[in-house]
């Protein structure tokens, strides 16, 4: 009588390998599924950006004429989110009060309206909110006019201060003649309201 043991053993091994591959593929697929952040009733043309601990996630969204925005944040995004990480948002560079907890395949709790982003309250003008390192690069927020920014930057012994406007990074050189900072001054003619800035000292 022929023996079926080798064949049976091979079949079991194949089934086990297929199960292992399936589990791996499922896990990899789940990690690739993004958290889809979105909202309505924002100012048309405003730029909504997401970050994790100050690291930009990329894929900034320009608010549509209807006031809608959407950002898909995958685990492979530049901010490298992991399960449970806090994702913060900015509106035209101004920090928003609302945050979400990242999860693969997640979406806002309010499925109909999404995330109702609102800017953080304006603190006293002319000061950085957060610690500026004596030497190096610091990510903090600032509220005040560009003239106040120049004064605060000089007090912190900063060389330059950069911020995002309309999706572009613009740099303000502390203590430089006004023509050097024309682009920055024009972009923030109304001042900065809790805007995230990168301070180089």
Image: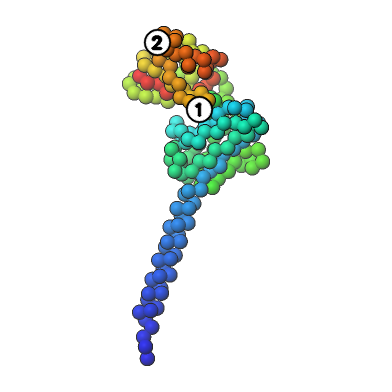
Compared with 148, 162 (above or below) is: below
Residue to which mark 2 is pinned: 176
Q: Secondary structure at mark 1?
A: loop
x and y, in percent, of residue 28 in the image: 45, 53
For the residues labelled 1 and 2, the Cα–Cα distance comes to 24 Å
Kindly identify the residue that appears in the image at 43 percent across and 38 percent down: 78
Kindly identify the residue that appears in the image at 45 percent across and 24 percent down: 169
x and y, in percent, of residue 146 in the image: 49, 13
Judged from this view, the residue extending furthest toward the left is 135
Compared with 9, 111 (above or below) is: above
Tag 1: Cα neighbours inside 10 Å, few (<14), some, or many (≥20)? some
Compared with 30, 150 (above or below) is: above
Judged from this view, the residue extending furthest toward the bottom is 1
Kindly identify the residue that appears in the image at 63 percent across and 34 percent down: 68
Tag 2: Cα neighbours inside 10 Å, few (<14), some, or many (≥20)? few
Q: Quadrant of residue 66?
A: top right
Residue to which mark 1 is pinned: 167
């Amino acid at each position: 009588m022929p023996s079926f043991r080798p064949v049976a053993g091979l079949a079991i091994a194949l089934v086990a390998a297929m199960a292992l591959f399936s589990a791996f593929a499922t896990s990899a697929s789940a990690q690739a599924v993004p958290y889809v952040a979105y909202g309505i009733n924002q100012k048309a043309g405003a730029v909504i950006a997401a970050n994790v601990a100050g690291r930009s996630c990329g894929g900034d969204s320009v608010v549509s004429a209807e006031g809608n925005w959407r950002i898909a944040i995958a685990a492979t995004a530049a901010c490298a989110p992991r399960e449970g990480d806090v994702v913060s948002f900015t509106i035209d560079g101004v920090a928003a009060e609302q945050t979400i907890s990242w999860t693969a395949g997640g979406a806002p709790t309010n499925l109909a309206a999404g995330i109702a982003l609102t800017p953080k309250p304006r603190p006293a003008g002319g000061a950085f909110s957060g610690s500026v390192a004596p030497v190096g690069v610091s990510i903090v927020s600032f509220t005040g006019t560009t003239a106040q920014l120049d004064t605060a930057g000089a007090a912190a012994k900063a060389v330059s201060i950069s911020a995002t406007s309309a999706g572009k990074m613009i740099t303000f050189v502390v203590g430089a003649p006004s023509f050097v900072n024309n682009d920055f001054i024009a972009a923030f003619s109304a001042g900065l309201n809790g805007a995230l800035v990168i301070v180089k000292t």
